[in-house]
Amino acid sequence: MSPLSRPATFCTLVAVAAGALAVAAFTLATMVVPGIDPLPSSLAGHLGAGVERALSLIGALAALVLSVGALVARAVFRSVPPWLVRTAALVAALLLALTTPGGIIPAAGYAFAVSVVGGIVALVVLVALRRPWRGLLLGAVLIGVAAAALAFGSGELVPRVAEALGAMLPGAAVPLAHVVASAGLLIWTIGEAAGARGRLAIAVLRHRRSLTVAAAACALPYVVARASWLTPWPLFGGSAELFAAEPTVRVVGLVLGAGMLAGGVLTLGLIRPWGLRFPRSLAGLGGRRVPPALAIIPASVVSVLFTAAGLQFAVEGTGSIGETGYLLLMFPFWLWGPLLGLATWGYAMVRATRPARQPATASAG
């Protein structure tokens, strides 16, 4: 039994088909139409432009066949061993991830940071509607944080972030299609494999708490480095001279650090009771079951993004071995991405087998 509802599965497969079609069309255009300026190279680009395009096209066509087949020809799929279909989907997702052009990570990072700020505001509003005094207290904290940000000279922060995102988005269209197709395949595979009970599935289910905690801990190096920007000893690119010349840099760094911290906390939701039922302090949602797709879909997308970025960081480096190691420590996406994918699979298996239990029991794994 898949933890994803039929509408969620249908939308996921449609997104895979649309993304794969866009990737295939663009890749074919770069092959046959002279003068098309290629996007920044992907991880597979180290093997040569021809190999990169071939792998991208193979991954896109495979994703298209799998998604369309799952949508309209499920009877045919039933005659194929499920493990073979899932393996093909994972291979296609890997090819699409490895051929994702550069440019998606910065845009995704800024977009995620902005969404975290919006999510915090929405959370405070929902708490205030159910628990007014608690909501007022949280609102006062938010106002204090906003006032502190303005004190750091961040009055132009919002327009600058909007301008940066606007400049990134046009170049992120094709990379986004890669991510949509590859992440969609991962989401579909996790849903289809939620009922699997092979050796790997049993191991993931048994150790899912450890996998999830390890994944969440990957946020700590970056969070600690950004938190140090509030001290006289800033790490990872910060300096008193830089903050004096560009006050908004400090605020942007702290917002990105808060976004990474939120990512770590949300990762823990895969094993915590509030990842199964909304906290009772939330108006309109308190006590209700969390739809599995609400956790599985974003976690799978982030897993694909982090894995692709981590591998690219590891292969390309930034200069010396020490500098590359420092970067990989600050951004342990190479570890976070795969761990998050496994943790999400474990969460899906729990939601598929024990969907109706109460939080304290269902969170055991």
Image (cartoon, helix red, strand yellow):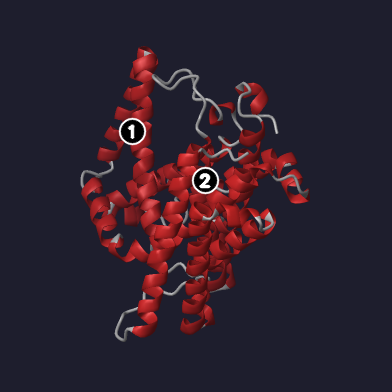
Residue 31 percent location from the top left of the image: 39, 82
Per the image, the residue denoted by label 2 is: 299
Q: Amino acid at mark 1?
A: Val
Q: Where's residue 160, x and y in %?
A: 24, 52
Q: Position of residue 95 (x, y in %)?
A: 54, 68
Rendered residue at 25%/57% (across/down)? 166
Q: Is residue 6 left or right of residue 241?
A: right
Which residue: 65% across, 39% down?
A: 349
Outermost residue on the front side: it is 75
What secondary structure is marked by label 1? Answer: helix
Work out whether 185 lies above or below 210: below
Q: Secondary structure at mark 2?
A: helix
> Which residue is at the front of the view, 350 or 352?
352
Q: Gap between marks 2 and 1, in whole Å?
A: 28 Å
Circle 1 is placed at which residue position? 145
The answer to which of 241 and 286 lies nearer the viewer is 286
Q: Nearer the viewer, residue 153 or 311?
A: 311
The amino acid sitting under disc 2 is: Ala
Residue shown at the point (52%, 58%) measured from the top left: 69
Q: Quadrant of the C terminus?
A: top right
